[in-house]
Amino acid sequence: MTRFLRLLAVLAPALLVSVPAGAQDMLDMVDLKSEAFTKAEMSRADIEAGIAKLKEGEKLDLTGKALNGLDLSGMDLRRTVLQSARLMMVNLKGANLEGVNLDSSWSLNSDLTGVNLKGASMFGTQLVGSKLDGADLSGARVAGDFSKASMTNVTLDGADLSADEKNQSMGLMRGTFRSTNLDGASFKGANLKRAMLEFASLKGADLTGVLLVESEIAGADLTGANVSGADFAGADVNSAKIGAMKNAADAKNLDQAKNLDKAYR
């Protein structure tokens, strides 16, 4: 929480930021009507024109640009760089962002329903409270914050959501899905080592062959999740609902999970 507030303060001093006494919703701590969340330096037409002028092998560099509130739905943005871009409350529904660099970008409360994010780089990306239902993040590097996002039926096959243990200058960077709705999501073969999934809903998710080593899934709901071949070594399952998982007998190292005696079985 402290890191989130510090980043918000750097992003826009005008935001109404306060340190809560309890676990107040992050989105309740900012003024979504402030200029920091509504200002756009470019229009959709500007971006389309910029892409149209690109020569072979070139990319439209939108690094650090404020694109807040724009309707970019259905756009092919594969030839853009969106590192550190501000995409607050943006409509990216059905957009193609395959392979795009979204590192350190901010997309709070945005609509990314059905977006193509295959192979995208999302290191330090903030997508708190956004919609990514049906999105495809196969093979993506995901070390950002997706807390309280809606991610039903997303595809994360082969994605890397693990913690970056080499670079911790701004805290532990990892896939964070605290209280995120991941019902029906596919994680086949994904790396979730030390990922944060506390209180996430993973009902009916496909966790086949997933590396859950030392992940934090306390309070998560894995009802109906397929955990065949999933490795639970060192995973914290305190208060997690694991009693109705599918193929639990085929999971690896479930007996080595932390707080197994406190899980709902």
Image (spheres, rainbow, N blue to C red):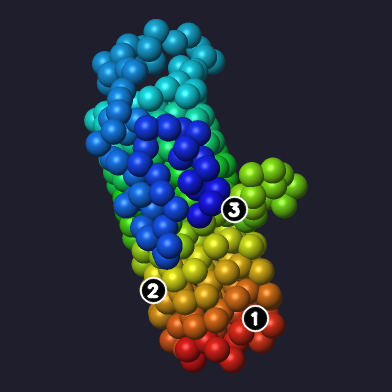
Q: Are marks 3 and 2 in contact (CB under 8 Å)?
A: no
* Residue at left offset 68%, top offset 75%: 234
| Frontmost residue, 9 versus 257 | 9
The residues tagged by marks 2 and 1 sit, at their Cα atoms, a distance apart of 21 Å
The residues tagged by marks 3 and 1 sit, at their Cα atoms, a distance apart of 20 Å
Q: Residues within 10 Å of mark 3 (few under 14, many from 20)?
A: many
* Left or right: residue 121 compared with residue 68: right
Q: Residues within 10 Å of mark 2 (few under 14, many from 20)?
A: many
Q: Of the residues shown, which amino acid type is indicated by label 1? A: Lys
User: Where is residue 102 drawn, in percent x and y?
Assistant: 49, 35
Mark 2 or mark 1: which comes first in sequence?
2
In this rendering, does residue 155 appear at all?
A: no
Mark 3 or mark 1: which comes first in sequence?
3
Q: Is residue 66 above or below residue 245?
A: above
In this rendering, does residue 49 appear at all?
A: yes
Residue at numbered disc 3: 174
For discs 3 and 2, the disc positioned in front in the rendered view: 3
**Secondary structure type for disc 1:** loop
Residue at numbered disc 1: 258
The residues tagged by marks 3 and 2 sit, at their Cα atoms, a distance apart of 22 Å
Q: Of the residues shown, which amino acid type is indicated by label 2? A: Lys
**Secondary structure type for disc 3:** loop
**Secondary structure type for disc 2:** loop
Instruction: Give the number of the disc on residue 203.
Output: 2
| Frontmost residue, 217 versus 54 | 217
* Left or right: residue 169 compared with residue 220: right
Q: Is residue 207 above or below residue 48?
A: below
User: Where is residue 6 drawn, in percent x and y?
Assistant: 52, 43
* Residue at left offset 31%, top offset 14%: 46
* Residue at left offset 56%, top offset 79%: 237
